[in-house]
Amino acid sequence: MSTSVKRPRPRKSAEPAAPAISHADQLIALQSREEGKTVMYKQDAWGHIETRFVRTQNVKAWEEKGFFVR
């Protein structure tokens, strides 16, 4: 039976913190990502609604997964 030997791990380098952006800038970025996409919904057995922003050409595939367009 072998004994375990603890080897020191090299430390991970710290990632630089991302600059904080304002709430308005976050909303603008979110809206630009969602622009031109179709909003699809799916409700589970517990009543939770899952929302997906889908490219228009993929709507049929998402409908096959049980999502619907509102």
Image (cartoon, rainbow, N blue to C red):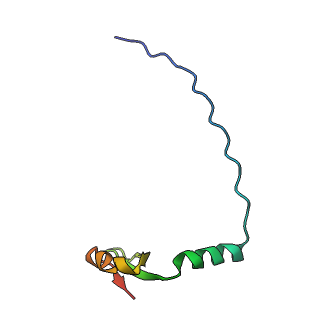
Picture coordinates of residue 30 (x, y %)? 59, 75
**Which residue is at a point 68% across and 41% down the rendered structure image?**
14
Judge from the rendering whether residue 13 lies leftward or rightward of residue 35; answer left or right: right
Picture coordinates of residue 70 (x, y %)? 40, 88
Looking at this view, name the residue that lies furthest to the front. 57
Front one among 3 and 70:
70
Looking at this view, name the residue that lies furthest to the left. 64
Picture coordinates of residue 36 (x, y %)? 49, 83
Q: How many marks?
A: 0
Occupied quadrant, residue 43: bottom left
Q: Relative to 27, does residue 17 appear above or below in the rendering? A: above
Occupied quadrant, residue 31: bottom right
**Which residue is at a point 67% across and 45% down the rendered structure image?**
15
Picture coordinates of residue 42 (x, y %)? 36, 78
Front one among 28 and 49:
28
Occupied quadrant, residue 44: bottom left
**Which residue is at a point 52% across and 19% down the rendered structure image?**
6
Judge from the rendering whether residue 46 lies leftward or rightward of residue 33; answer left or right: left
Front one among 40 and 58:
58
**Which residue is at a point 66% across and 38% down the rendered structure image?**
13
Rendered-image quadrant of the N terminus: top left
Looking at this view, name the residue that lies furthest to the bottom. 70
Q: Relative to 8, does residue 34 appear above or below in the rendering? A: below
